[in-house]
């Protein structure tokens, strides 16, 4: 299937559907990039080395950020 074959269908999408399509295309381009694969590998190495947070720690960090006064 080519872009020209699906373009008429894309033109008929609602604005909301086009936004979802845009998000999907951006995600798929990132997911397929060498840079993204390298970043995921780096993060996996960090987690394997013990640098990870459990859900309670993340919730505590989020609560602290939400309670902090705006710096701007």
Image (tube, grey):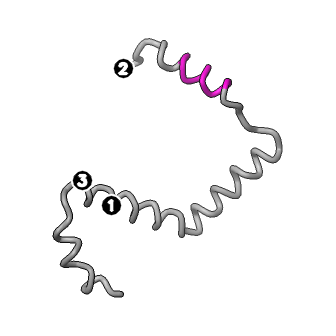
Which numbered disc, 3 or 2, marks the residue closer to the eye? 3
The quadrant of the image that shows the N terminus is bottom left
Residue placed under numbered mark 2 in the picture = 72
CA gap, disc 3 and disc 1: 10 Å
Q: Label 1: how many residues lie within 10 Å, few (<14), some (14-19) or many (20+)?
A: few
Which numbered disc, 1 or 2, marks the residue closer to the eye? 1
Residue placed under numbered mark 3 in the picture = 16
The quadrant of the image that shows the C terminus is top left
Residue placed under numbered mark 1 in the picture = 22
Instruction: Please name the predominant secondary structure of the magenta segment in the image.
Output: helix
The image quadrant that residue 21 belongs to is bottom left
The image quadrant that residue 11 belongs to is bottom left
The image quadrant that residue 37 belongs to is bottom right
- Label 1, secondary structure: give it: helix
Give the residue at x 45% y 60%. Answer: 27
- Label 2, secondary structure: give it: loop
Q: Earlier in the sequence, mark 3 or mark 1?
A: 3
Q: Label 3: how many residues lie within 10 Å, few (<14), some (14-19) or many (20+)?
A: few
Q: Taking 37 as reference, is 9 left or right?
A: left
The front one of 71 and 33 is 33
CA gap, disc 1 and disc 2: 31 Å
The front one of 4 and 9 is 9
Q: Earlier in the sequence, mark 1 or mark 2?
A: 1
Give the residue at x 48% y 13%. Answer: 68
CA gap, disc 3 and disc 2: 32 Å
Rendered position, 70 above or below 57: above
**Residue 67 place in picture, x, y as percent:** 48, 13
- Label 3, secondary structure: give it: helix
Q: Which residues are magenta?
A: 56-64
């Amino acid at each position: 299937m080519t872009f020209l074959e699906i373009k008429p269908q894309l033109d008929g999408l609602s604005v909301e559907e086009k936004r979802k399509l845009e998000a999907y295309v951006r995600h798929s381009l990132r997911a397929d990039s060498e840079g993204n694969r390298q970043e995921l590998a780096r993060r996996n190495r960090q987690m394997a080395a013990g640098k990870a947070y459990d859900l309670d720690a993340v919730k505590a960090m989020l609560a602290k950020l939400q309670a902090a006064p705006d710096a701007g």
